[in-house]
Image: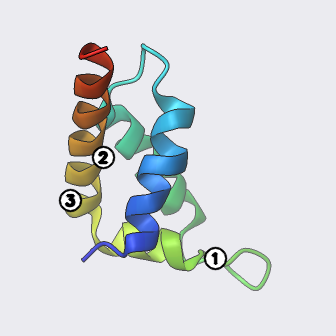
Amino acid sequence: MLLQETKDYIEDVLLPENMDGYNRANNIALEVLDDIEWVGDGDEMVQPTRLARNIAANRKEFTDYVVKAFQDVEADNGSD
């Protein structure tokens, strides 16, 4: 289950920084998941944050939530 912290991150940081007219929702989610996979379990110098661990543990739900939030933003922008 995604934490509220993760949902807030998607809506407040991830989408605003990545919705540039070129990126698709699925690409945004995959980029984050790739970054987390690259860090892996980390070592004493680099430890995944609680946010990263929550995203990694809920990959499908994270991707689905990013897609839904992306569509919501697009719908809101289209109604202006």
Image position of 67 (left or right of 6):
left
Image position of 6 (left or right of 74):
right
How far across and how far down the image is residue 12, in percent? 51, 49
Tag 1 and tag 3, C-beta contact below 8 Å: no
Residue at position x 42%, y 14% in the image: 22
Quadrant showing the N terminus: bottom left
How far across and how far down the image is residue 24, in percent? 33, 26
Tag 1 and tag 2, C-beta contact below 8 Å: no
The mark found on residue 76 in the picture is: none
The amino acid beneath tag 2 is: Val
Q: Which residue is mark 1?
A: 42
Give the class, few, some or many, for how many residues have Cα within 10 Å of label 1's Cα (few <14, many ≥20): few
The amino acid beneath tag 1 is: Gly
Say above or below: 78 vs 37: above
> Of tags 1 and 3, which is closer to the observer?
3
Residue at position x 43%, y 52% in the image: 10
Compute the Cα span from label 1 to label 2.
25 Å
Say above or below: 15 vs 33: above
Give the class, few, some or many, for how many residues have Cα within 10 Å of label 3's Cα (few <14, many ≥20): few
> Of tags 1 and 2, which is closer to the observer?
2
Give the class, few, some or many, for how many residues have Cα within 10 Å of label 2's Cα (few <14, many ≥20): many
Q: How many marks?
A: 3
Compute the Cα span from label 1 to label 3.
22 Å
Compute the Cα span from label 2 to label 3.
10 Å
How far across and how far down the image is residue 34, in percent? 46, 50
Q: Which tag, 1 or 2, sits closer to the chain's start?
A: 1
Residue at position x 51%, y 35% in the image: 16
Q: Which tag, 1 or 3, sits closer to the chain's start?
A: 1
Q: Which residue is mark 2?
A: 66
Q: Which residue is mark 3?
A: 60
